Image (cartoon, rainbow, N blue to C red):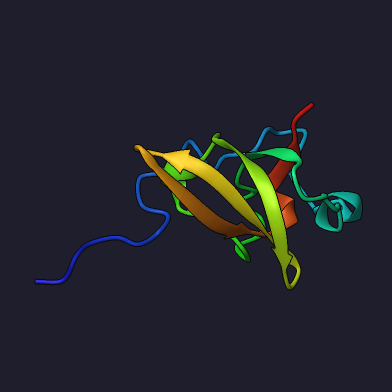
Amino acid sequence: MMRTGGARRKSRHMLLRHYKERGKISLSKYFQSFKDGDRVQLLLNSASPEGTFFRRFYGKSGIVTGKRGRCFEIALHDRGNNKTIIVHPIHLRRLA
């Protein structure tokens, strides 16, 4: 028997956007840039399916280690392991 569901399974409330943030994606957020060593927070934007990450990493913070195409490589610590994920900048927020 095949497994039910996909990558967005059980993410109904997590992928909801605030009513003031709905609509088109701002270009400044789409084209934002980061330098190596910047701390960022992972937040999915459900309007853009490109360059998303697995939902377990939602809300986690990491460090930018490089760029791969239009996306960024993020190093983070998850369940006792160091992991690197590739994320589009629309799903990232800079931390101070």
Residue name at image x 65 percent, y 48 percent: 45
Figure quadrant of residue 93: top right
Instruction: Tell which residue pokes out farthest to the right in this image.
Output: 28
Q: Of 59 and 72, which appears nearest the observer? A: 72
Q: Going 86% across and 52% down the picture, which residue do you hit?
A: 32
13 relative to 3, above or below? above
In the current view of this chain or complex, which residue is farthest to the top?
Answer: 96
x and y percentages locating residue 6 in the rendered image = 35, 62
Q: In the image, residue 10 lies at what x, y percent?
A: 35, 45
Nearest the eye: 90 or 25: 90
Left or right: 5 as drawn, with respect to 56:
left
Q: Is residue 12 visible?
A: no
Percent coordinates x, y for residue 28 in the rendering: 91, 51
In the current view of this chain or complex, which residue is farthest to the left? 1
Residue 89 in view, yes or no: yes
Which residue shows up at 66% across the image and 43% down it? 63
Q: Residue at x 50, y 37 (%)?
A: 14
